[in-house]
Amino acid sequence: MKTANVQGYGDDPLSVRETGHYKKEYAKSFVEKWDDLIDWEGRASAEGEFFIEQLRAHGCKKVLDVATGTGFHSVQLLRAGFEVTSVDGSAAMLAKAFENAHKRGYILRTVQADWRWLNRDVHDLYDAVVCLGNSFTHLHNENDRRKSLAEYYATLRHEGILILDQRNYDAILDKQVEPSHQYYYCGEDVSATPEHVDESLARFRYSFSDGEVFHLNMFPLRKAYTQRLMREVGFQNVTTYGDFKETYRESEPDFFIHVAEKKYVEQKDEGQE
Ligand SMILES: C[S@@+](CC[C@H](N)C(=O)[O-])C[C@H]1O[C@@H](n2cnc3c(N)ncnc32)[C@H](O)[C@@H]1O
């Protein structure tokens, strides 16, 4: 078994809890393997039309994919007829996404930008921002999470929506279930398992069939915490789905998907009848 040394974890991997570390974590050799992990065809059939239907139901046409990764959702959305701009902070990921899209007959419009200062590089308004594939979990401190959500909010038009997904970390932290990876990590002969979990770190181990091993250090977002942050930056309506379903038992889903609306909702002032 070869544990890749290229991800910059050093001698004390559990101490690596910095937001900016994602660029090192997605080392070129890991990026090259990412698509084995997610298997595009398996993922497409597991997700079905969920995101497309959400976007259409909210009248969205112009979408900003802020966590493009290797391009899976950008390509799915282009295929479904949306106008897509593909953002990622990692140049290696964007290069891979461009190549993947090109192979499938699409030219991606890419912007390399970090979410914490997204609007420095993205100067347009969108009907939807999508942040998918458990990406928001890469932000290791609360200020970065608030700032990124505020940046997403700012790039949305008035009635726009944010769709952001996350692992069911409550179930992992509270040791209710082991995640089954049914929906996202569909690749054969690949395993993704939590190697260490505490309230501020979930370190996952990704083992590939050729014996290579990579890791990701992520912040374990509790569902209610993510919902609260979204409301605090101004999203008033937040609907959370569990593995694409509206009703679910809390410990069951592998993933939660939050759909947060920017639309202003009139509320009675406190004390008002
Ligand atoms: C888990 S991957 C998911 C990729 C893709 N959405 C998928 O589902 O396959 C997370 C992506 O978020 C990007 N990312 C992480 N932190 C970021 C940040 N602060 N700003 C911009 N991109 C970031 C990484 O470079 C990586 O491509």
Image (cartoon, grey):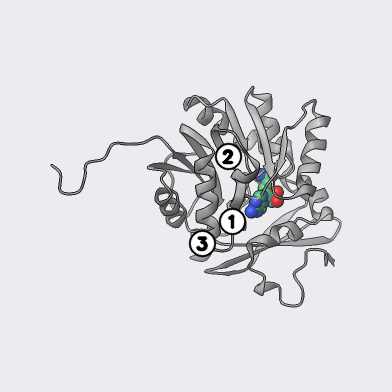
Mark 1 to mark 3: distance in Å? 11 Å
Which one is closest to the eye, mark 1 or mark 3? 3
Whole-percent x and y of residue 150?
50, 48
- Secondary structure of the residue carrying numbered label 1: helix
On screen, residue 226 above or below 110: below
Residue type, mark 1 in image: Thr
- Residue annotated with mark 2: 130
The residue indicated by pointer 3 is: 142
Q: Quadrant of residue 46?
A: top right
Q: Residue 73 in the image: x percent, y percent?
A: 66, 36
Tell which circle, 1 or 2, labels the residue nearer the N-terminal end: 2
What residue is at 76 percent from the left and 43 percent from the top? 94
Is there any visible trace of residue 168 in the rendered image?
A: no
| Number of the label disc, if any, that sits on residue 137 | 1
Identify the secondary structure beneath mark 3. Answer: helix
Q: Quadrant of the N terminus?
A: bottom right
Disc 2 marks a residue whose amino acid type is Val
Q: As drawn, which residue projects farthest toward the left? A: 273
The image shows residue 80, relative to residue 168, as above or below, that is above
Q: Amino acid type of disc 3?
A: Glu
Q: Is residue 251 left or right of residue 67?
A: left
- Residue 220, given in percent of the width and then of the height, sits at 55, 61
The answer to which of 17 and 53 lies nearer the viewer is 17
Say whether residue 214 is left or right of residue 245. Answer: right
